């Protein structure tokens, strides 16, 4: 079965500094990987996905993620953090069974300090 | 872009009553809809998968008689929490998988259910 690990419960970064939110995955077959952001009492907003192709994926709001097959990682990055980026971030992998649901990591809270 | 409308956004109900949550895909057809549950400060846990016109597939540990899912059309799925109890209080989120675009998943805005 597939799984996703987000090792950091919280990441703190100063505004203007680069940020990284870590994610590693385990799945049989080709990985289909996603990043979502959640604001309080809201659903999930799509940031980016990796299906195939370039290992560096660019997404919404200036975010990007780097797919590393050998390390089974898909870390989320942004060159310059904004206070408004403060939110809960989820990494997800599409499951390798027929239902094709997403399996989510535990989430990482990003706190950007002004 | 793809939009999924979920309502109500919040609901308070008394123990023993039933609550229906609707999830509609507004501008696309959803072959599959997923229902998730999220406890405070926790991740999303898949409850069930529903395909239009067929019975939902429930995850292990999810009571299908308590959480009734109906997916009557390609744009509407409903989750009914029957005989709700305080332990059912949670944040419920639906997700629709598009029929016309690979790998696209769109999420509703969620429903905060409080059972008193």
Image (tube, coloured by chain):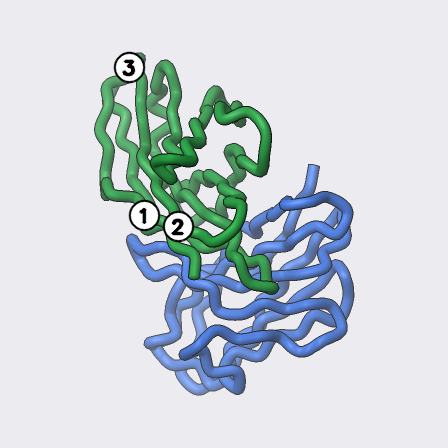
Chain colours: A green, B blue
Q: Are marks 1 and 3 on the same chain?
A: yes
Q: Nearer the viewer, mark 1 or mark 3?
A: 1
Q: Which residue is mark 3?
A: A17
Q: Is residue A85 above or below residue B47?
A: above
Pick whichever of labels 2 and 3 is earlier in the sequence.
Answer: 3
Please state which of residues B54 and A15 is positioned toward the viewer in this rendering. Answer: B54
Q: Which residue is mark 2?
A: A26
Q: Which residue is mark 1?
A: A5
| Residue A5 percent location from the top left of the image | 32, 48
Q: Are marks 1 and 2 in contact (CB under 8 Å)?
A: yes
Check disc 2: other Cα within 10 Å, few if <14, some if 14-19, many if 20+. some
Q: Chain of mark 1?
A: A
Q: Chain of mark 3?
A: A
| Residue B9 percent location from the top left of the image | 52, 56
| Residue at x 29%, y 53% (from the top left corner) | B41
Pick whichever of labels 1 and 3 is earlier in the sequence.
Answer: 1
Q: Are marks 1 and 2 on the same chain?
A: yes
| Residue at x 53%, y 26% (from the top left corner) | A59
Query: CA–CA distance between discs 1 and 3?
Result: 24 Å
Callout 3 secondary element: loop
Quadrant of the frame with the C terminus of chain A: top left
Give the side of residue A101 with respect to residue B62, left or right.
Answer: right
Please state which of residues A19 and B13 is positioned toward the viewer in this rendering. Answer: A19
| Residue at x 46%, y 40% (from the top left corner) | A36
Q: Nearer the viewer, mark 2 or mark 3?
A: 2
| Residue at x 29%, y 39% (from the top left corner) | A109
Callout 1 secondary element: strand
Q: Nearer the viewer, mark 1 or mark 2?
A: 2
């Amino acid at each position: 079965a597939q799984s996703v690990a987000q090792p950091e419960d919280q990441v703190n970064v100063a505004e203007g500094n680069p940020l990284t939110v870590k994610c590693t995955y385990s799945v049989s077959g080709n990985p289909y990987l996603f990043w979502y952001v959640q604001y309080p009492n809201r659903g999930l907003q799509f940031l980016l996905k990796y299906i195939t192709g370039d290992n560096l994926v660019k997404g919404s709001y200036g975010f990007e993620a780097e797919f590393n097959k050998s390390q089974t990682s898909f870390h989320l990055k942004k060159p310059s953090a904004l206070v408004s980026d403060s939110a809960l971030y989820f990494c997800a992998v599409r499951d390798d069974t027929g239902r094709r649901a997403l399996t989510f990591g535990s989430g990482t809270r990003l706190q950007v300090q002004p | 872009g793809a939009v999924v409308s979920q309502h109500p956004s919040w609901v308070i109900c008394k123990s023993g009553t039933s609550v229906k949550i609707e999830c509609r895909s507004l501008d696309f057809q959803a072959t599959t809809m997923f229902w998730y549950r999220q406890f405070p400060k926790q991740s999303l846990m898949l409850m069930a998968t529903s395909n239009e016109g067929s019975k939902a597939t429930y995850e292990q540990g999810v009571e299908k008689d308590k959480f009734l899912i109906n997916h009557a059309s390609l744009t509407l799925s409903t989750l009914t929490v029957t005989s709700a109890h305080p332990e059912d209080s949670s944040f419920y989120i639906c997700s629709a998988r598009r029929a016309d675009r690979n790998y696209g998943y769109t999420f509703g805005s969620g429903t905060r259910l409080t059972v008193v």
